[in-house]
Image (cartoon, rainbow, N blue to C red):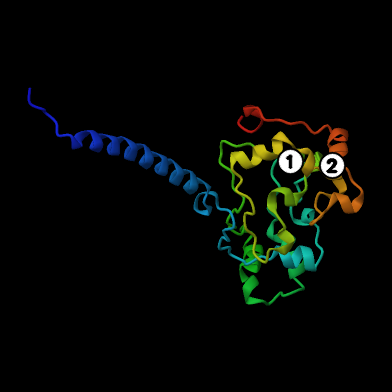
Amino acid sequence: MAQIFHRSTNALSRITIFGGVFFLAVLIWAADQWTRSSYMTGQDVVLHQPVPFSHDHHTAQLGIDCRYCHTSVEESAFAGIPPTATCMNCHNLIWNESPMLEPVRQSYATNTPIQWQRVHDLPDFVYFNHSIHVAKGVGCESCHGRVDEMPLIYQAETLQMEWCLSCHRDPAPNTRPRDQVVTMGFDPKDHGVDPAQLAEEYNVQSLIYCSVCHR
C-alpha cells in the first residue's frame, strides 16, 4: 500500500506540537509580566494632580504629622483626603499669592473640592481598613513607602493580592510600636524593639482567608 503521508510529516508534527507548547508558555509568561507591569499596577507612576503637592516638603522638611491631613486614618477604613480648609490653615498666610496655589484658593472660595487623582486606588471588590492596620502597629511606610522622600507622591508597591498576602502570612516583621506608625525610616533595632514580641502583644494574627479582604 502506498504511503499516504510523506516522511517529513512526522518531523513537522513534532515541531508543531513542541512549538505550540513553547508558544503557549511564552504567551503565559508575557501575560504574567504584563499584569505585574506598572501599566497595570500603577507602581512608581506619578499622576498629574491639580496642584503639585510635595509630601517631601510638608513631612520631611516642615515636620507635619501625616494625621494632620489624613485625620481619620486611626478611626476609619478611609485615611481621609484633607478639605481645602486644612490647606488654607497655612496657605492663607504662606504662599498666599503663589500662582501654583490658585486652584487651592479657588476651591476654598467656591467651596468646591479639589479633584485629586487617587494614587492608591484598590479595586471595588477589595476591602481595606486603615484603622485596624494602625491599631496593630503597621507603619504608613509599609504600604505607602517613604513618602517623606517623594517630591510628588506615587504608589510605591504593586498593591496586588500576592503583595498583601506576603505580609498577611507573616505580619510580625512589619509591626512597630503604635506611637511610631507615622515615623518614616523607623528601624526596630535602633529602638530596641522586638517586632515579634509586639505582634504578640497587639494580638496580630495571620489572616489569609478570603473574607478578610473580599466581603
Q: How many marks?
A: 2
The quarter of the picture where the C terminus appears is top right
Query: Mark 2: which secondary structure?
Result: helix
Q: Residues within 10 Å of mark 1 (few under 14, many from 20)?
A: few
The quarter of the displayed image where residue 126 is located = top right
Lateral position of residue 5 relative to residue 179, left or right: left
Q: Is residue 93 visible?
A: yes
Across and down, in percent, residue 117 comes to 57, 56
Rendered image quadrant of residue 47: bottom right
Q: Nearer the viewer, residue 158 or 147?
A: 158
Q: Return the residue at label 2.
A: 195
Q: Residue at x 25, y 37 (%)?
A: 11
At numbered mark 1, what does the secondary structure look like: helix, strand or loop? loop
* Residue under the point 11% across and 28% down: 4
- The tag earlier along the polypeptide, 2 or 1, is 1
The answer to whether one can see residue 128 in this image is: no
- From the viewer's perspective, is residue 88 above or below residue 42? below
Residue 201 rendering spot, x and y as whole percentages: 88, 34
Identity of the amino acid at label 1? Ser
Residue furthest to the top:
1
Q: Which mark is residue 108?
A: none
Residue at x-position 41% and y-position 40%: 25
Asked if disc 2 and disc 1 are in contact, CB closer than 8 Å, the reply is no
Q: Amino acid at mark 2?
A: Pro
Q: Position of residue 165 (x, y in %)?
A: 65, 37
- Label 2 CA crowd tier, 10 Å (few <14, some 14–19, many 20+): some
| Spatial CA span between label 2 and label 1 | 24 Å
The residue drawn where x is 63% and y is 50% is 157
Q: Which residue is mark 1?
A: 76
